[in-house]
Amino acid sequence: MTGTGAGRMSEPASTLSSPAAALNAERDGGVTQQNRTEERSWMRTAVAVLAIASVLVFTSVSARADERSAGSEVASARSQIDASLAQMRATSLRVRDQLRTARKRGTRAQITCVDEALSRSDVAFRRARELGDETLAAYARSDLDGARASLRRLAELKESQRLAATSATSCGPNQVIPVASASSATTVRLEISPTIAPVP
């Protein structure tokens, strides 16, 4: 009786402990699952942060490279503009001198031709100076396409002025260049006989 009673008394305790253990196991499993979820979330966040940092670093490096490239292009463009304007100024002055020569000893048609060529040359030079300012202003506002288009137009104006100067040279009065010629020299040899008496 005693043994049987003790066994019967222990059954409820065992029966009561089973749900508690299951509850604890379920709770532990939930905590483990939650930890794993949080760990995966943290890893995704870390990867995203690293990706953003990499993009920012690459963007910063690219931006600095673009700035250096743009600065070099601006310096090159400024030198090109200065050289082109200096050459165009010299061309205008040369055509102006040709007009002076034509007015001195050229025909009316020649004067008219050189005068028209000078007008085209001066117009091209003035427009080139304006384009030089427009080009630098475009670079200042980071309008690379506009600046490059202005540079191409300036080169076209330079070529247009060159053609005008060539026209002035071809239609102006010819330059007469004296050419020295070698003159033929004649040598005369005079021999006097010693037998001829001198004139008193």
Image: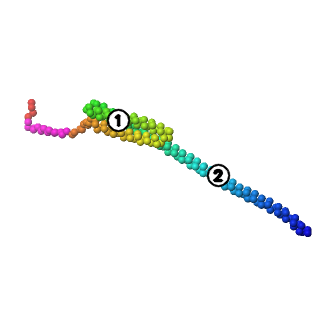
Mark toward the start of the polypeptide (2 vs 1): 2
Determine the image quadrant of residue 148.
top left
Closer to viewer: mark 2 or mark 1: 2
**Image side of residue 109 versus residue 2, left or right:** left
> Between 128 and 104, which is closer to the camera in this rendering?
128
The x, y position of residue 200, in whole percent, is: 9, 30
Determine the image quadrant of residue 5.
bottom right
Q: Residue at x 77, y 61 (%)?
A: 22
Q: Could you tell me which quadrant the N terminus lies in?
A: bottom right
Q: Residue at x 10, y 38 (%)?
A: 193
The x, y position of residue 122, in whole percent, is: 36, 34
Q: Residue at x 82, y 63 (%)?
A: 15
Decide: is 9 above or below 40.
Answer: below
Q: Amino acid at mark 1?
A: Arg
- Residue 120 shows which numbered tag? 1
Residue at image mark 2:
45
Q: Secondary structure at mark 2?
A: helix
Determine the image quadrant of residue 194.
top left
The x, y position of residue 58, in whole percent, is: 56, 49
Asked whether residue 80 appears in the rendered view, the answer is no
